[in-house]
Amino acid sequence: MSRNARRLLLRIAFYVLVIFIVIYTVFPFYWAINSSLKAGTDLFSAAFLPPSPAWTNYVSVFEDQPFALNILNSVYVSGVTVIISLFLAVTAAYALGRIKFSGRGVLLLVVLSVSMFPQIAVLSGLYEVMRWLGLIQRLESLIISYVIFTLPFTVWILTTFMRELPKELEEAAIVDGASPWQTISRVFLPLLGPALATTGLLAFIAAWNEFLFALTFVGNNNETQTIPVAIANFSGASEFELPWGGIMAASVIVTVPLIVLVLIFQRMIVSGLTAGAVKG
């Protein structure tokens, strides 16, 4: 086989693989949209396009339950979680990445090890803490819980980025009389944009999709339910009926904001994920 023929076969195999990966990743979201536009017995059909789109599924999501309030709850919890996590992570990353002290590596490993505990292992203890604080059935219990689990990986990632920043910048800031906080906020923070976008989006998605803590802490309160719990509690006309069309419609509605965020910050995310991969 000639070299040109081999290159052609490799290129065809590459594009076939890319098409397969795209279909494999996009098809579930397409099928969710397809199912959200079906009603009645059409849900059991394998038609790739619904014969008569049931747009009423999207209307019923907001009419039959306080889904708009559930979305606001998730936006509030996820947004506050990201803000607190990034603030604490930036200050911790500065200490762990720029200040030399004994036990720094051990402390960083301890921070990372916290994220290795499964949620179910700490659920009962965390529930007792929230009950003692009087935060059960309140959104603040979710914010505290999510910060605990998003902070370790945000600290770890930002510490890695903080170590890669040129030391000369910090020395110049110190010579100019800048305090540690001024060095962080005015020198390092503008350079950490890609890292903040990457870690912030990961923390937002984790809080947006979390189900176990939300079900345990605020699961019975319709006014404080977040999106995953609200969707899980969707009910049909009877106790034996599941409104799959409405569930799929709600799933599509809550997935769109994540897609929009990824598209908006895609360049910063790529820069954040690839920064430090090559040293020049």
Image: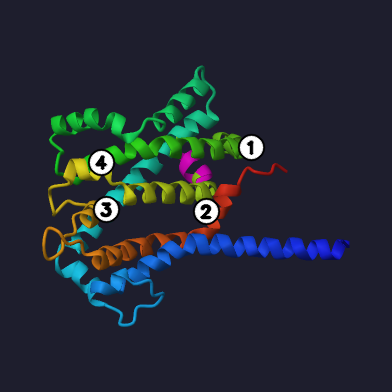
**How many discs mark residues in the rendered view?**
4
User: What kind of residue is marked 1?
Assistant: Glu
In this view, the residue in front, 207 or 176, is 207
Residue wearing tag 2: 269
In this view, the residue in front, 170 or 121, is 121
Between the residue at mark 2 and the residue at mark 1, the CA separation in whole angstroms equals 26 Å
Callout 3: helix, strand or loop? helix
Q: Quadrant of the N terminus?
A: bottom right
* Percent x, y of residue 37: 31, 74
Residue wearing tag 3: 228
Residue sitting at x 14%, y 33%? 131
Give the magenta-colored segment's residue range. Answer: 182-188
Way the structure is coloured:
rainbow
| Circle 4 or circle 1, nearest the eye | 4
Upstream in sequence: badge 2 or badge 4: 4
Callout 2: helix, strand or loop? helix
* Percent x, y of residue 66: 16, 62
* Percent x, y of residue 159: 51, 35
Upstream in sequence: badge 2 or badge 1: 1
In this view, the residue in front, 31 or 70, is 31
Instruction: Tell me if 119 is positioned left or right of 241 in this view.
Output: right
Residue wearing tag 1: 168
* Percent x, y of residue 196: 47, 48
Q: Is residue 187 magenta?
A: yes
Picture quadrant where residue 54 is located: bottom left
